[in-house]
Amino acid sequence: MHPALRGDAGARAPSARLEEAVGLAAAIDLDVVHDEVATVNAPRAATLIGGGKIDELRARLDAMDPRPGLVIIDGALSPVQHRNLEKAFDAKVLDRTALILEIFGARAQTAEGRLQVDLAHLEYQRSRLVRSWTHLERQRGGAGFLGGPGERQIESDRRALDDKIVRLRKKLEDVRRTRTLQRAKRKRAPHPVVALVGYTNAGKSTLFNRMTKSAVKAEDLLFATLDPTMRAIDLPSGLRVVLSDTVGFISDLPTQLVAAFRATLEEVLEADIIVHVRDIAHPDSDAQRSDVIDVLSALGVGDDDERPVIEALNKLDLMDADDKGTVEAIARTAPAIGAIENPARVALSAVGGEGVAALLSKIESTLTAAHIVAHIRLPAHDGAARAWLFSRAEILGEQAAGAETLITARMSRKTEGQFFKEFPDAKYDDAASADRQRA
């Protein structure tokens, strides 16, 4: 059931939100026997929805054979509302956050993914601890008969959860350090990183498989991908990049998940280019785009981030000729290089392969626009400068020139500036590079 608050003029229609909730339920193989939108005039503190709707749903549950054992409310429930609705329906109740957590728990494959899901689960459960029994309440603390009242059961449960949360956070901090080291190694290599992001089920993994010729799990399911995957691919010119497939975003993504998966999502923060994969055939494609931008902003990729962003307008194969022509026109009129609010665009079909070559070319042209080719002369004995260039730039050529070594390297302007600041004895070999240094 999707509770539609009267007067809430959101970007999505309530029916579309309900359809997405049904898709979330299908993602963990739940058999949905009934779905509906319930208009809520004024949210009730005790139950969210009104007594009449509760009675109506209770009667519907009782009339079904077998009686459904689960009611999903596509919204955020407070702990009190959660408990009261379970009593009223005499069935287990999940809100939107709990449902997404269940999906993540069922899908996480790697040790890292399971750690992140476990942490999010525990933090969610901690906010919903209620005193279901009181067998510790009358225990006394201290020795003899003069001690005060002992520990209540809810306090014991909360402390146990807190201890588990601390342990999981420590393990995830170790994961984050490992990922930081891995990123540092990639930075030393001359391979730029391209991160695929987008709404869940937008086709990221299908596009990833098409571009890398690999077989990452890709299904027509919400949150088919939870664990990040990285592969090296060669662009048309031979330039090698690392492509990263990430977890999909969704509207009202639980804050516990954003926090728990931050170690994974930080891959996006380190990317040289962000490719935002959109399901352009979806009726709520624009609203989904806004949700993805909101999550990226929460991660630190906001309006002031100048990193290049390319929107991959995916699923052309699901559109008729007129709509397809409109999308292709939108892609043609987009800027050649753009940031998050006004990105470059490419129309494509990850399933059929149409437009994928154009996306690879767009990635390449975006990278090469941000990189320069410099011809640098080094003293032949300066091994440190040579090693620095080989670790941080793409070396296109090297030759000895008497007491000097001539190196041709492709690198970003930032890397170029860092190099000449670190090694002032190095010199440009060509006039264009010298002009750039003087500028």
Image (cartoon, helix red, strand yellow):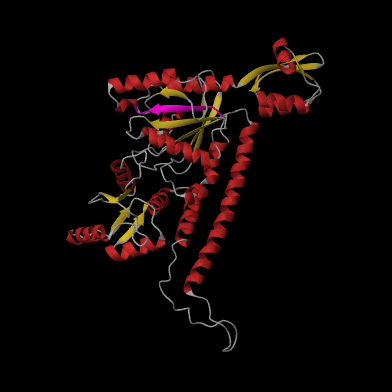
Where is residue 431 drawn, in percent x and y?
Answer: 72, 10
Determine whether, in the image, residue 105 is placed left or right of residue 416: left
**240 or 344: nearer the eye?**
344
Figure check: 260 above or below 196: below
**66 or 390: nearer the eye?**
66
Q: In which quarter of the image is the C terminus?
A: top right
Chief secondary structure of the magenta span?
strand
**396 or 283: nearer the eye?**
283
Count the numbered circles shown.
0
Is residue 50 on the magenta stretch?
Answer: no
Where is residue 185 drawn, in percent x and y?
Answer: 63, 36
Q: Which residue is most to the top?
A: 431
Determine whether, in the image, residue 244 is placed left or right of residue 332: right
Q: Give the residues in magenta.
A: 307-315
- Residue 406 visible in rendering: no
Where is residue 303 drawn, in percent x and y?
Answer: 54, 33
Name the residue rendered at 60%, 50% in the picture.
Answer: 174
Q: In which quarter of the image is residue 377?
A: top right
Figure check: 160 above or below 272: below
- Residue 221 visible in rendering: yes
Where is residue 169 drawn, in percent x and y?
Answer: 56, 55
Is residue 309 on the magenta stretch?
Answer: yes
Name the residue rendered at 47%, 52% in the picture.
Answer: 117
